[in-house]
Amino acid sequence: MADEPLIYENQFNVQGGNFNDAGKVASHIKAILKGFGIPSEAVRKTALVAYESEINIVSYARKGVIHLRLARDQVVIETIDEGLGIADIELAMQEGYSTATDKIREMGFGAGMGLANIRNFSDIFQISSEPGKGTSLKMIIKWRP
Amino acid sequence: MTETSPIDLSTLVRLLQLQVRTGADRLDRPVRGGYVGDLLSDVMGNSHEGDLWITRQVHPNIVAVASLKDLAAIVLVNGSEPAPETLTKAEAEGIPVLLAEESAFAVAGKVYALITGAVQIAT
């Protein structure tokens, strides 16, 4: 993939705790991909992983950045946040496990499905985290051009 | 078995006596399926394009989910009133928000029967 030339690259800042704008970056990314004529299945998968990562930053970080790198046959979404981090990644990946507050749950978030969704809808998924520092995710979605 | 054309939103609005709060100009969209849920990640992961989303969640974030997943419309049940911000966002994104007095169970049952053709529609 290192040799695949990029056709588009951008990055978006996400503010922690701002639930009113949650999903804005994902919507923007979806519109960009649609504009490039990416197959709709790949657009929907990318929109989902971007949305779930954005919600995670809003819910558990002070701030974060979502990087978008688009090539002819794949898109890479990479997120880096400064926040709570995850102590036990294996546990956090389990569907239904969540550390969300009541406030977050009242809005319909915190179902403990976000990371599982991201893994299920990505072709390649990497996660690393340092408790108290933050979490980084990398998701790749591929298609036949 | 006879070939039936998919039911559109305006037909569901009429038969289920739904209130149309936003997206009145988009009710010609066909409804091919539905999903019931109040957990946003559940809906993100399991709903499909063109689904009718039945929920009691009224927070503005439901609009982003419906838009990202290309859902046909959101039906709020039990007479729930959407937050004003939800309607503003839905109007801006072109997402129909429909209100039902009935429960999610009743709405889902009727919609299921109609779109699977189990119940014939009198026109």
Image (cartoon, coloured by chain):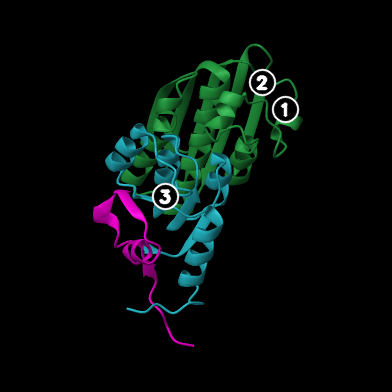
Instruction: Give the alpha-carbon distance from disc 1 to disc 2, as whole Å.
Output: 8 Å
Instruction: State whether residue A14 appears in this view.
Output: yes
Q: Which mark is residue A129?
A: 2
* Residue B14 among magenta residues: yes
Amino acid marked by disc 2 = Ser
| The hue in which chain B appears in the rendered picture of the protein | cyan
Question: Callout 2: residue from which chain?
Answer: A
Q: Is residue B14 above or below residue A101?
A: below
Question: Callout 1: residue from which chain?
Answer: A
Mark 1: which secondary structure? helix
Q: Mark 1 or mark 3, which is nearer to you? A: 3
Can you say which quadrant of the picture contains the C terminus of chain B? Answer: bottom left
Q: What range of the chain is rendered magenta? A: B1-29
Amino acid marked by disc 1 = Ile
Residue hosting label 3: B74
Q: Which mark is residue A89?
A: 1
Q: Are marks 3 and 2 in contact (CB under 8 Å)?
A: no
Instruction: Give the alpha-carbon distance from disc 1 to disc 3, as whole Å.
Output: 34 Å
Instruction: Give the alpha-carbon distance from disc 3 to disc 2, as whole Å.
Output: 36 Å
Of residue B112 and residue B67, the one placed in the foreground of this image is B112
- Sort mark 1 into few (<14), some (14-19) or many (20+) by Cα contacts within 10 Å: some
Q: Which chain is green?
A: A
